[in-house]
Image: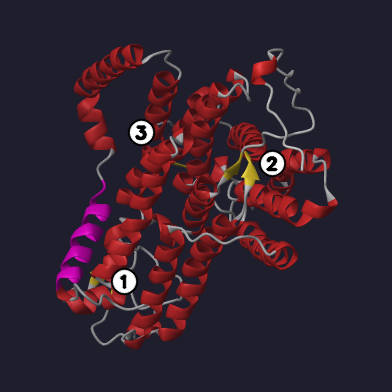
Amino acid sequence: MKDLLLTILGCCIYIPWFAQTARTPWKRPDWSRQWLLAMLSLTGITILHIPSVMYICAGLTALSLAVYILCTKPAFKATPILIISIAYSLWFALSLLWSVSPRKGMIFIIDNGLPMVLFALTACVIRMEKEELITLLRTFCRATCIFIGVAVVSWLISCQETHIMPWDWPVLRKTDVENRYIYQWVFRFLGGMTNGYAHPSYNLLPVFMAGGIATWLRKEQKEPAPVWWIIWSGGLLLTLLTESRMGIIYSGILLSGYILYLMPSRRWRIGATAVIILAGIIGMAATGDFWRQYGQDDIRHSLYSDTWAYIQKKPLTGAGAGALNPIEICHTIGKEYWPHVGYIAPEREVTDWPVKTRMLPHNQWLADWAHGGLLAAILSAALFIFTAIRCLRTRNYWGGIAWVIFVIFSVLEPTLYIGKGLYLFCWLYCLAYTPLIYQTDRADTPVQPLPTDASTVPTQTVR
């Protein structure tokens, strides 16, 4: 019963979207574009929520995009991200020729390739005003604040249910509570303890993205400083409560970025950077043994080494779309054991593995290389490279922070193979690539007085 009530409470994250949609001044000639922007805003919030809701919203966004294109016939401008996304999907489609599981390969292309193309195509046809972008990002930040609040409520209720005082909750100990992972207790509002989505890294990833966005909004004076502090401190608190190792790194990146971005001059930034680096070195030297022990993960290292051994066997083609799984890897490199899976008999068929692959290599580019060969890894890396170039050219602070976090995360996880990671990355590069309209001739713009000097008044030729 508590899980059901908390799940209902979790739906409160959509309140900012409904409030903003109600306040939007809808215009008849522009309604299809405004509705597509509203669906993009909703998509960002669904990434905070349950994946099934996120997939449904992506379908509605695709429908909204089709309506917008049919109604307005907007100008189309191709971007590098669209070309790379199409090439990535086509290459995996070609790899079906040597895949032993083509049906599963088609599912992979639909689940992973189509969202990339959808969001990249959206950025090629839609335009938005800067104020519209700010409104969209502000709504996402406010939904994140509610997400943090509901997570804290869920944790407090779990403390009461397990008879653990809040200050006695296990922190940085990698233990469980009543034979359940502790992050299941914290994120039980995302569908319940048993069938809910409780992965701490992917649940916290949008929170830290919101932290970078809130920093930019604070600099633009579009959001007060307390919003950033709620997101940052709340993200750090949830990191400690769920014992997420990655969240500690991201909290440090966000705090450093916040300090440097708000510095008044380059000289101040250089000095602050030196202080941050020095403090980091001293802190790591004092606590290095703890972090080495806390960050030790023998299974992750085993997955790295086994995947690299597999890549050396099939460097150009990989397994083919849908065929990368523990059975395929073990058969190819001559092993009969896989972590958390157990014994894998040599006579077992690769096609016996379920559709959703378990225990993929915990690295985005190793996963792509093993799955689709060297070209797949290059195209995957190109997505990140061109996103970074775009953020540098447009001086996009929040996009740059998101990129840094995604790169670090992709070294440790197959980010684009997991729904929340894929949709968040695509959502962010869609917004980063969408051109902004700067309105100069608005009805509320004050009219400049005419010059008083007659010599400066333009003459008009009479015909």
Kindly identify the residue that appears in the image at 46 percent across and 40 percent down: 399
Q: Which residue is mark 2?
A: 13
Q: Residues within 10 Å of mark 2 (few under 14, many from 20)?
A: many
Residue 308 part of the magenta-drawn span:
yes
Disc with the residue nearer the chain's start (1 vs 2): 2
Disc with the residue nearer the chain's start (3 vs 1): 3
Disc 1 is placed on an element classified as helix
In the image, what residue type sits under mark 2? Ile
Residue 216 part of the magenta-drawn span:
no
Kindly identify the residue that appears in the image at 33 percent across and 73 percent down: 325
Pick the front one: 139 or 121: 121
The kind of secondary structure the magenta stretch mainly shows is helix
- Compared across the picture, whether 253 is left or right of 299 comes to right
Q: Circles 1 and 2: CB distance less than 8 Å?
A: no
Q: Residues within 10 Å of mark 3 (few under 14, many from 20)?
A: some
Disc 3 is placed on an element classified as helix
Q: Which residue is mark 3?
A: 249
Disc with the residue nearer the chain's start (2 vs 3): 2
Disc 2 is placed on an element classified as helix
Query: Mark 3 and mark 1: span between their CA atoms?
Result: 29 Å
Q: Is residue 267 above or below residue 133?
A: above
Q: Circles 3 and 1: CB distance less than 8 Å?
A: no
Q: Which residue is mark 1?
A: 371
Q: Which contiguous range is marked in magenta?
A: 297-312
In the image, what residue type sits under mark 3? Ile
Query: Mark 2 and mark 3: span between their CA atoms?
Result: 26 Å
